Amino acid sequence: MERGSLQARHERLAQLVPVTMSVSSARDRLLPVVPALGSLFPDAGLTRGSIIGCQGPAAVSIALAAVAGASAAGSWLAVVGLPTLGLCAAREVGVALERLVMVADTTDLGEAVWANMLAALIDGFDLVLVRGAAQLRSGSARRLQARLQARGGVLVVVGDPGQFACDLIISAHAGRWEGLGDGTGRLVQRRLTVSASGRRMARARQAEVWLPGPQGGIEAASGPAVSGPAGTGPAGTGPAGTAAVAFRWTG
Amino acid sequence: MGDHQPSPRLTVVWCPDWSVVAAGASPLEPAAVLHANRVVARTPAAAAAGVHQGHRRREAQRICPVLRLIDHDPARDGRAFEAAARSVAQMVPRLETTEPGSLTFLTRGPARYFGGEHDMAQRVARLVREAVPGACVGIGIGDGRFAAGIAARRSASQSASQSASQSASQSASQSAGQSGRVPEPVIIDPGIAATSAYLSPLPVSTLLVVGGIAAGTVDLLSRLGLRCLGDLAALAGADVLARFGPVGAFAHRIASGGDDRPPGTAAPPPELFVALTFDEPVHMLDPLVFAAKHLAQQLHGLLAADGRVCTRLVVCAETEHGERSEHLWYRPNGLSVATIIERVRWQLDGWIQQPGGLSGGVVLLRLIPDEVRPDDGSQLGFWGGRSEVDEWAARAVARVAGLIGGQQVLVPVWRGGRQPGDAYTWVSVDQADVAEPTERLAVTDMPWPGQLPAPSPATVMPEALPAEVFDAVGRVVRVNGRGGLSALPHTVSVQGRAAQAITAWAGPWPLDERWWDPHQHRRMARFQFTTDRGAALLAVVEHQQWWVTAIWS
C-alpha cells in the first residue's frame, strides 16, 4: 500500500475523531460547526446548553449554517415556526435531512402548549431551531433555558429572541450577490460579513463568508471585499451550461 | 438434513389486485394503483387492455391511454380488507393476514365442521364475496403456504377468466351484476408426493411471485436451465445448498412440496407478551397507534435480546364494553417495529370505522408473538445503526405528536421537481418512519431538466406572494408567450408593499410543466431579482400575474 494514501487515511481518521465523539458522548460540551464559521464561536464550536440568536436579513441562512456541522455529525435538528424553510437550501448547506423534524403550524397554539412542546423538543433534540420566540413569557423562557442547560442541547433562535438571554448573537447585514447581471447570469454566491457578539466575548468578532456559495454551501471568503456594482459577476456564470434553459431577451 | 416433513394443511384466500378494489375502482373501469412509478395492481378492464404489474407509469399509459392512476396507500388497503377478515373470522377462529388481500388459516378444523374441504372453501368464498362485493376472490387449499398460495392464485385467475367470458357473452351492465358468483376452489391433494406432482410443471418464477425468493436467485435458476419447479426438485438438496446457500435450500424444499416454515421456528413461551391498559378509554386512532409504537419497541427489544424475531403476531384490542378485535399477522421475514405499527394501524382503523362503530373506547392493547425464529436477518448497528441520540429524538417526536397532534409534526420526503418547493415535500410522522429515512429520502440521481441550479433559496413560500414588477416609467412589465419582456424590470413590489428598486435581474426562464394534463398544466416564466435592500427573490409570471415564490434569506 502506498505511503501517501496511508497518510491521507490517518488524516481522515483524525478528522473523524471529533465527529464520532460528539455523537456518542453528552459530556463533551461542544458540538461541531462548519469551519467557515468556527472563528465566530468561543472554542470554535456550539457550546451545549447555549442559546444562539440569529438576526438580520440573512438570519435563516445563518441559522442553518450554524447547525449544519452538528447536524451532519449525527445530531438531530427540530425546526419550529419556520414553515417556509427551503429544504434544498438546508441540504446544500450541509444539514442532514434524515435527522430533521419540523413542527409545522404553531400559530394557534397557546403559550403554555408552545412552551411544553419546546420543552419536549429540547429533551430529545441536540439542536432546536425556532422562530417566534417573542411570544414566550419570561418564566417559561427561564424554565426552558434551565432545561436546555441540563439536557445539553443548543437552541438557535431566528429573529426576535424575546425573553431568552442569548449567549451569542450572530447577525449579518444584507450581503452582496454575485453572478446576476442586467438580464444575464444567475445568482451564484453571496458575500456576507457575519459578526458575533456575546457574553463570553470581549469584543465582537467578524467573519467574511460566502453564504450561499456557488454550490449552496458555506465557504470562508478570503481577501478584501471586491467593490463595485452588484451584477458584475464572474465571467461565464450565465445560465448556459446550467439546467435552466434561458431565453435571452433581445428587445 | 433430514427428510422433508409434511407441512400443515392450509387454506389461502387471495384477492388479486386488492389495492384497486380498496381504492373503490369499478372492475369495468381501466384503473391502476402505482407505487414508486410501477403498477402494483390494476382492474380487470385494465388487465384486458394489457396493463400488468411492474409496468412503468408511462408504459401503462401508452398501452391504455384512458387509464386512471391511483396513488398507493397501504393504510387504505388494510382498512378495506378488515371487513373481509372480520366476516371470515365468524367461521374460522385463527385467521392470519400476510398482507391486505390475503388470508391464511389451518384447514383441518373448519373443514371437518363444515362438511369437507370443498364445502368449507365455498362457504368462505361466499362470505368474502359478500363482505367485499367488487373483489375477485380465489381460494386454494394445499400443504403449506406455498402450495396453498399457488392454488388460490389459480382459483382467482380461473374465476376472473370465467367472468371475462361471461361479460363477452352478455352485456357489460349485466356482467357487473353477475360478477358476484362464487369462485371454484382449487384443492391440492394432501401429501408431499401429490404436492410435488402438482408443483412440478409450474415455472420457477412462481418462487418469486408466491414464495418470496429474491428475483436474482430465481433469474439465475432459469438461466441455468431450471425452467420449472420439477427441475429444481429433481436436484439433490445438498447440491443446491452447496451452490445457492440457505436461500437455494429453502427454494428447493418448497419446490419439492416440503415444509415452507423457516427452520428453527417455534412457539414462544406463553408469558411472553406486551400489553398496555388505558385508564381513560381511547376513542381516537392516533393515540392508539402511538401506544402501539411503544409496545412494538418493547416487544422487539425483548425478542432481540435473545436474538429472535417475531414472524407471526397476535394484535388484540378490547373496548370498555368487551368488544374485541384479535388478529394474526404473518410476515415471513420477521416483523420489525415499523411493520408491527403498520399492521396495528390497519387492524384498528378498520375496526374503529366499521359500520355501526364501537360502543366505547379502547381500554386494552396487547401484542402477543405467536411464532418466533432466530433472527438471521440483516444485522444493523455498529456503523450507521441507531444510536442513543436517535432514540432520544424518536421519543421526543412521539411526545410532541401527543401534545399537538401527529399531523403537525413533519419529516421531509424527496419527491423531485423543478420548483424549489417541489423537490421535497413534508409528511406527518404518523405516516413515515422517523428513524428509517432511507426510503423517504432516497434521491433519484436522474436530473430534473429545467431545475434552477444551486444555490437554492432558504425561504420557500408555501403559497406564492402576489407581486408587481414595474418598468422605469411605472408600467407593469408583461411577458409574452415567447419569453419576450414588454420593458426592462425596474422596481418590484411584493404584496402591495413599497416598491424596491431592482439592482440586477435575469430571466425569463420558461417552464412548461404537465402540458398533457389539462388540470395540472402550468406554464410560467421564472426570474431572479436582487433589490437595493439586498434581497434576492425568485419571481414567476403565470397568466400575466407576478408572484414571488422564494427568497434567498
Image (spheres, coloured by chain):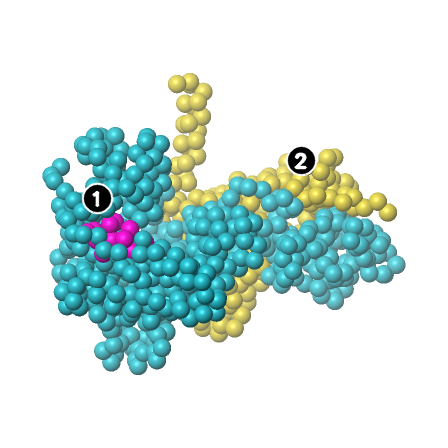
Residue A240 figure quarter: top right
Residue B472 figure quarter: bottom right
A244 and B164: which one is in front?
Answer: B164
Q: Is residue B52 magenta?
A: no
Judging by the rendered image, the residue that carries numbered circle 2 is: A223
Q: Residue at x 48, y 69 (%)?
A: B173
By secondary structure, the bulk of the magenta-drawn segment is best described as helix
Outermost residue to the front: B169
In the image, residue A7 above or below residue B358 = above
Mark 1 is surrounded, within 10 Å at the Cα level, by few (under 14), some (14 to 19) or many (20 or more) other residues, namely some
Residue interval drawn in magenta: B141-153
Amino acid carrying mark 2 in the image: Gly
Q: Nearer the viewer, mark 2 or mark 1?
A: 1
Residue A137 in sight: no
Looking at the rendered structure, the secondary structure element under dot 1 is helix
Relative side of B295 to A186, left or right: left
Q: Which chain is yellow?
A: A
Q: Which chain is cyan?
A: B
Amino acid carrying mark 1 in the image: Ala
Q: Residue at x 45, y 73 (%)?
A: A112
Q: Is residue B144 magenta?
A: yes
Judging by the rendered image, the residue that carries numbered circle 1 is: B197
Q: Position of residue A101 (x, y in %)?
A: 46, 57
